[in-house]
Amino acid sequence: MAKLLSKSELIGKIAEQHPNNISRKDVKIVIESLAAIGYKELKKAGAFFVPGFAKFVVIKKPATKARPGINPFTKEPTIFKAKPARKLIRARPVKAAKDAVA
């Protein structure tokens, strides 16, 4: 798998695309404010949309009780552990992002 861009590398690449107008410091402020707004919107509304990139959605998973079952590999009876209620975040890419990868 390819190496992921770090935050500073991402800021550098964005600043390189706009060398005359935007400084690295300005790009960093915009990225941090985008993240902060996204966190608040996810907490408040349960969804956050970044145009041209993805829609982030909070999915609420209910708690599950411990239950008996059968281990599919060994065929032995077993007890599956209980899980607490939790919230997950899913990113749903927009069509343009899917097309860029294909």
Image (cartoon, grey):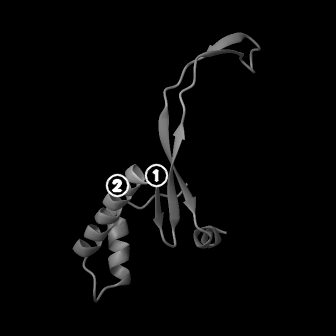
| Dot 2 crowding, Cα within 10 Å, few <14, some 14–19, many 20+ | few
Determine the residue positioned at 49% across, 71% down. Answer: 51
Image location (x, y in percent) of residue 22: 28, 82
In the rendered image, the quadrant that contains the N terminus is bottom right
Q: Which amino acid, mark 1?
A: Gly
Q: Is residue 39 left or right of residue 80?
A: left
For image coordinates 51% across by 68% down, the residue present is: 53
Where 78 falls versus 34 (above or below)? above
Quick one: which residue is furthest to the left in this view?
25
Q: Residue furthest bottom?
A: 20
Return the x and y of residue 86 as percentages of the image width and height.
48, 35
Res 35 quadrant in image: bottom left
Q: What residue is at 52 percent from the left and 73 percent from the top?
A: 52
Near-viewer residue (63 or 13): 63
Tell me if residue 66 comes above or below residue 94 in the rendering.
above
Displayed quadrant of residue 100: bottom right
* Residue at the disc numbered 1: 46
Residue on which the image places disc 2: 40
